[in-house]
């Protein structure tokens, strides 16, 4: 399996971004991990059952793993896209459900929500990778001359 040229840039740039984001979270202090966990709990209340430090490490590991899946050409594009779509959808849910991040319409970001609103792009890139369609070459049949 390899990258199709049309999706290589999507996978490489997004994967590198996620790897960097995950690596930066490996050294989260307890307070920052708890803040991220609190935001995540707005969309997925069950995360509150995990110790904050464990949540922070799991988030970091998940971002690094997903980023790696995106940059490695051995991972099929649709599979990498499914992972990115799920992760992006989770981030969008956090954005939409966290008070103060959206305007009254629930969609447009407030100043505080601009940083999280960009996560909609991750979800969109994931969907684009999932909807990847391989172009098939059309081979025209050549009629062989009749033999007499």
Image: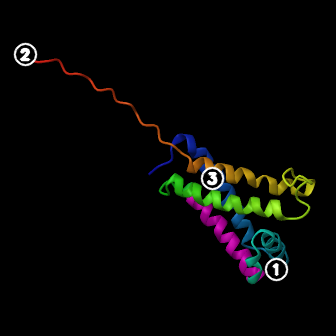
What residue sits right under mark 1 in the picture? 30
What residue sits right under mark 2 in the picture? 148
N-terminal label among 2 and 1: 1
Q: In x, y percent, where is residue 47?
A: 74, 77
Q: In x, y percent, where is residue 102?
A: 88, 56
Secondary element type, mark 3? helix
Q: Is residue 59 magenta?
A: yes
N-terminal label among 2 and 3: 3
Determine if residue 41 is in view: yes
N-terminal label among 3 and 1: 1
How far is disc 2 from disc 3 in space, using C-alphas? 58 Å
How far is disc 3 from disc 1 in space, using C-alphas? 31 Å
In the picture, the disc for residue 126 is 3
Question: Image quarter for residue 25?
Answer: bottom right
Q: In x, y percent, where is residue 46?
A: 73, 78
Tell me which segment is drawn in magenta. Answer: 50-70
């Amino acid at each position: 399996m390899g990258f199709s040229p049309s999706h290589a840039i999507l996978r490489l740039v997004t994967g590198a971004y996620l790897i960097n984001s995950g690596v930066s979270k490996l050294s989260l202090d307890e307070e920052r991990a708890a803040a991220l966990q609190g935001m995540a709990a707005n969309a997925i209340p069950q995360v509150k059952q995990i110790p904050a430090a464990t949540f922070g490490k799991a988030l970091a590991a998940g971002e690094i793993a997903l980023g790696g899946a995106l940059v490695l050409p051995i991972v099929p594009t649709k599979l990498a896209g499914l992972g990115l779509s799920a992760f992006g959808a989770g981030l969008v849910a956090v954005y939409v459900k966290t008070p103060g991040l959206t305007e009254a319409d629930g969609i447009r970001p407030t100043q505080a929500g601009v940083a999280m609103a960009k996560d909609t792009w991750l979800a969109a890139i994931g969907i684009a990778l999932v909807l990847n369609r391989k172009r098939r070459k059309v081979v025209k049949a050549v009629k062989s001359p009749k033999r007499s």
